[in-house]
Amino acid sequence: MTKSVNLDELDQFLSSDESPENCMMLSDLDGLLHGVICSPSPVSSDVWMAAGLGAELKELPEWVVNTLTDRYMEIAQGLAHDPMVVEPIFWQAKEGHVIAMDWCEGFMKAVSLNPKEWLRLSESGKDGHLMTPILLHMIDEQGNSMMGITQDQLDKALFQASEVIPDSVARIYLYWQ
């Protein structure tokens, strides 16, 4: 990551009382940014920042806007690079396993900004599966998979899905190019 993107400071801000009440946390925001960059049509920074931070640009500290813009550019450059570089920010549980659920929720928030356009991918017949690793992380309020995965298989399925998310994101990005 570039030195200009100080994600530790951003993470502290997002967790503080200074942040907007409805703002996402760092992993969710990173998923949102990846989804916005992969989007079939451009999403203005006013729209995605309001969706992710729960506030208008003018209400946010300048350094927060700059840090998010830097991270946006870093992700976009990684996707434009050959070979592509996709490095999602997932949480790490104390037990050592990866938690990609928040990141996936952020990505799906980006999808919700242009849902009709994203339908072309999910209904394409041959490429709709690209969204599967992300969709597998959608869990209801009772902790059950929204994709019908049984509780005894859920941890394994989520781990396997999180491993292929970077490749899926790269392929989703290419789908819209």
Image (cartoon, grey):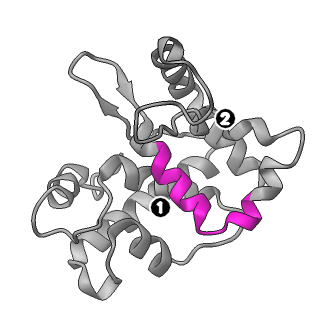
What is the span of residues highlighted in magenta in the rendered image?
104-118
Label drawn at residue 132: 2
Residue at position x 55%, y 61% in the image: 110
Q: Secondary structure at mark 2?
A: helix
Of the pair 64 and 77, the residue shown nearer to us: 64
* Relative to 24, 31 lies left or right: right
Of the pair 149 and 119, the residue shown nearer to us: 149
Quadrant containing the C terminus in the rendered view: bottom right
* Relative to 164, 31 lies left or right: left
Which image quadrant is residue 42 in? bottom right
Residue 109 on the magenta segment:
yes
**Location of residue 54 in the rendering, given as x and y in whole percent from the top left corner:** 33, 73
Label drawn at residue 73: 1
**Location of residue 87 in the rendering, given as x and y in whole percent from the top left corner:** 46, 38
Q: Is residue 166 visible?
A: no
Residue 48 on the magenta segment:
no
